[in-house]
Each structure stands twice: as structure tokens, then as C-alpha cells.
Amino acid sequence: MTDTPRIPYDVTDLGQAAEGVRRIEWADREMPVLRLIRERFEREQPLKGMRIGACLHVTTETANLMRTLKAGGAEVHLAASNPLSTQDWTAAALVSEYGISTYARRGEDNSVYYSHLRTVADTHPVLTMDDGCDLVSLLHKERPDQIPEILAGTEETTTGVIRLRAMAADGALRFPVVAVNEADTKHLFDNRYGTGQSTIDGLLRATNILLAGRNVVVAGYGWVGRGIASRMSGHGAHVAIVEVDPIRAIEALMDGYQVMTVGQAAPWGDVFVTATGNVNVFRREHFETMRDGAIMANSGHFDAELDLPALRAMAEGHIRDVRPNVQEFEIGGKRLHLVAEGRLVNLGAAEGHPAAVMDLSFANQALAAEYVAKHHQELEAQVYVVPKAIDAEVARLKLASMGIVLDQMTEQQLEYVSSWQHGT
């Protein structure tokens, strides 16, 4: 292991690199699709000469994606996409063992967070890889002179896609971005199964509460909310959904959950989890009616889903840490609890998604990077979904890695589904 890396970096402790390598290798065992792509990239070098600026959660799974991009010939510079999601051992290993410039420290404040983003921007990337659109937003706001250098980008998460589409609608987006989040093999599995399991993992690591019998409120019934609700129900919790979309609300009702307004849910719930991608879902008027001992956590990208300034003001300084990753706010004689400072609970209080599900997401990222590197000249400055061929290839590789063989249609069946002449 290199004692004095010759690449630029800013991490907490390079001495943790050996631990990082062990954990990265453990995750790699659960990521066979990405491993197959990495082996092909090493042979074909589809990203040769490309400088990639990445803003992603610095986890063991992300490390394996970075290794794949580097194997494909790319020069990669990585910053954290969330101040609490960084695994310091992973950051150390990326620098010391894998030679990837990494700028990430767990618990970094906003000033350091944005200085790291600016450092990545300083490298003049030609491809961007974002999780939440912060890097793309910074480049557009602060570095408009660099925009012509950028060929294209990719975006990992729902919140980032929402921001990008708003930019495109305003005519502000100046280079094409592929919304990896919109791939079926990403949102159907990562958002639902990955976030569903890892949210509960983070919540239980932080609080050690029993979920059975508790009233759990899930705000938002997109793929993330569906996953959280399903797993909460599986643990024996009574689940209520808060939604503004009538189709999602009736789906939640038919899936067996109660549907409430935020005002109805606030005094009913014991545990509250936000997953909306919006701001101030739970606010002052809701904190006022919550039960003593209520627990709040967020599984959306930004901590703005909970009105934290109002919560802090209401506590008037009566705030203390009661467990690792749990803060207690005393308000009018009752106590409200906040997990992971309101940031992503699955990464702030646990280790994020299982590697097996990130295998699908990051396979899409790697193949999307290859796609935009090859086809950027054909793309306009708008948001694109992942090509269906990439989505299908990721699913095919995953099934093959599990030893599953799909059936195939007969010639008669192929003729039948391609013809309009067959009747009843």
C-alpha cells in the first residue's frame, strides 16, 4: 500500500486504508455485474482520455464504481455528495490503494463540502457524475466558462433528476445528462429494495427500538416510500402514508396502508420517515402536535424535508445527543428525536444500500458513462433516460450471475405477437 500518494486528496486518515480495502473487496463479492463490466472496460478502454468529476456517496459500493471507471481509462476525481455519508476508511483506500483523487471527510461542514466540489470542478471534468445535482448546479452557477468543456453527465438519484428537469424546463441546462435513476433496473430495485432495507437498518442502529406495534408514518409513496412502507409493515408496524398524488394515495390504500394528511399523521405517529424530494414536509405546526418521544428520520436526498430551523428554534437550546446519531429536542415538556441530523438515515446512521442492489445501479452508471462518452455529439442539452438496451443488459447480466436462465418464445409465439391478424 502506498505510503505517500502522489495524487491530490483530502480525506480524514490514510491510516484507515487497509480497513477500507477489506470492506471494498467484501462489497465487490456482491457486485458481479459491475465486476464483469470492469473486466471488459479494462480490455476495451472506452473511457480513455476522459476526465470524470464525480459527486457521489463515498461508500464501498461507490469505490467499486470508481475502480471500474478507472479501469476503463478515465481519470476520476471524487467528492462526497452528503456530509454524513462518507466512510472514512473507503475514502482512505480510494486514495492510498486505488489511486483515485478523493475529497471527502465524514461530518464535514457545508464550507468544506462546497470547497471539495470546487476542487473537483477545478480539474475541468469533461464528464460529470452526480448524486443530487450539486456538482452540475455549481458548474452552471459558478463556472459557466467551463460548460463548453463538458460533453455530458449522469445523475444517480430522484432529487437530482427533479432539479435537472427544472433546469431543462427553464432553458438553463447547457449539456446533456442521462438520468440513471430512471432506469428500471435502478429505481425498481435500488429505490425500493435498497432504500427500504437500509432505511430500517439506519433507524434501528441509531435507536434500537422495536418496530412491531408502532405507528409509522411514511411521507411519500414513490419507489422509496413503497419500499420503506413494505419493510416497516413486515416488521409488524402500523403504517400510514402521506401523499399529495391521488394515484399514489389510492395505490397505498389498496396496498393495505392508511392514508392521512400530514396534520392527521402528526399526533398519530410514533416514527416519521420522509421520502418526498420536497421541503418542509413536517413543520412547526406538526412538531407541536407530535407525541412525546416521537422519532423523525429522512430518506430523501436533502435534510430540507424536515423544517429543522423551526425544530431548533422551538427547542430554545434544549438539544442534546442521547445516542450516537440521535438528537433530542425538548419542546414544552415533551421530547422529539431526530436521527442522523435529518440527513439520509440509511447513510448517516448505517452503511447505505446493500452492495447487491448497488450492483445494478452502478452498472447502469458505468454503462451510461460509456454511452455518453461515445454518443455525446448526438445528444442535446436535455435530460435523457437510460437507453433500454443498457437497462436490459444490466438485468441480463444480473440474472446470469445468479444462474438464472430465461425462457424464449417459440417461432409460433414470435409470429403471434408480431401479427395483427390473429383473433379470438
Image (spheres, helix red, strand yellow):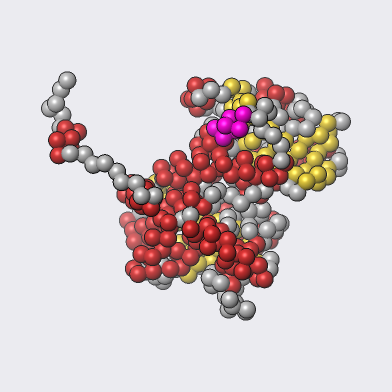
Position of residue 213 relative to residue 400, above or below, is above
Query: In the figure, is residue 290 to the left or right of 83?
Result: right
Query: In the figure, is residue 287 to the left or right of 420?
Result: right
State the residue in front, 17 or 400: 400
Q: Quadrant of residue 296?
A: top right
Query: In the figure, is residue 125 to the left or right of 414?
Result: right
Q: Main secondary structure of the magenta part?
A: helix
In magenta stretch: residue 231: yes
Q: Position of residue 315 (x, y in %)?
A: 83, 38
Q: Position of residue 123 (x, y in %)?
A: 53, 69
Q: Residue at x 78, y 35 (%)?
A: 336
Which residue extends farthest left?
421
The answer to whether one can see residue 423 in this image is yes
Q: Position of residue 265 (x, y in %)?
A: 67, 25
Residue extent of the magenta highlight: 229-236
State the residue in front, 372 or 72: 72
Quick one: quadrant of the C terminus? top left
Q: Residue at x 63, y 25 (%)?
A: 238
Q: Residue at x 72, y 24 (%)?
A: 267
Q: Position of residue 114 (x, y in %)?
A: 64, 59
Position of residue 294 relative to residue 301, above or below, is above
Q: Residue at x 59, y 78 (%)?
A: 2
State the residue in front, 332 or 173: 332
In magenta stretch: residue 138: no
Quick one: quadrant of the N terminus? bottom right
Q: Quadrant of residue 91?
A: bottom right
Q: Quadrant of residue 421?
A: top left
